[in-house]
Image (spheres, rainbow, N blue to C red):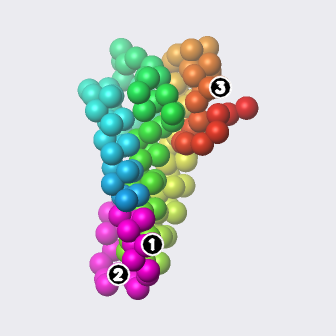
Amino acid sequence: MAALLWPGRSGRLPRVVRGCGAAAVLAGAALAGAAAARLGRELTPVVDPLPGARLQTGGVFAISRHPVYTGLLIASAGWTAWRGRREPLVAAMVLSAVLHVKAVLEERRLTARFGAEYRAYAARTPRLLGRRPR
């Protein structure tokens, strides 16, 4: 995440691109923040759910199984567009790969912990955003 803040002058991109990038930063931060708020004390940086944690399926978790990750990815893509430099793009790509691996591992742990309840949730809710899984 820190690599997204790579120093240097911003590239010269059209204002509309930079504006869309700024909007994406705000939207991604709002999504990640809403998800973090919903999790409350159950928010953890590790892939294992905390003991006693409940499966979250409402609010922003009804549109994404990983709304914190989704928000971070949207914000990092927006930041990359806003900056208009290659270095933040590389950092965003690495972040995307890391969060993908983390999501897969987390889903395995959630399936082990919540079983059929998690499988049903995963069947109706996309991993990030978009269409429902098949």
Element marked by disc 1:
helix
Rendered residue at 49%/28% (across/down): 62
Element marked by disc 2:
loop
Rendered residue at 33%/74% (across/down): 6
Q: Is residue 126 visible?
A: yes
Q: Which mark is residue 17?
A: 1
Q: Which residue is label 3 attached to?
A: 123
Q: Amino acid at mark 3?
A: Ala
Q: Position of residue 7 (x, y in %)?
A: 30, 78
Horizontal relation, residue 21 to residue 43: left or right: right
Horizontal relation, residue 28 to residue 127: left or right: left
Q: Amino acid at mark 2?
A: Ser
Task: Tell me the quarter of the picture where residue 105 sits.
Answer: top right
Q: Residues within 10 Å of mark 3 (few under 14, many from 20)?
A: few
Q: Position of residue 86 (x, y in %)?
A: 47, 78
Query: In whole angstroms, how far apart are the C-alphas of marks 1 and 2?
Result: 13 Å
Relative depth, front residue between 44 and 79: 79
Tags 1 and 2 touching, CB below 8 Å:
no
Q: Which residues are magenta?
A: 1-22
The number of discs equals 3
Q: Which residue is label 2 attached to?
A: 10
Q: Is residue 88 visible?
A: no
Query: In whole angstroms, how far apart are the C-alphas of marks 1 and 3?
Result: 35 Å
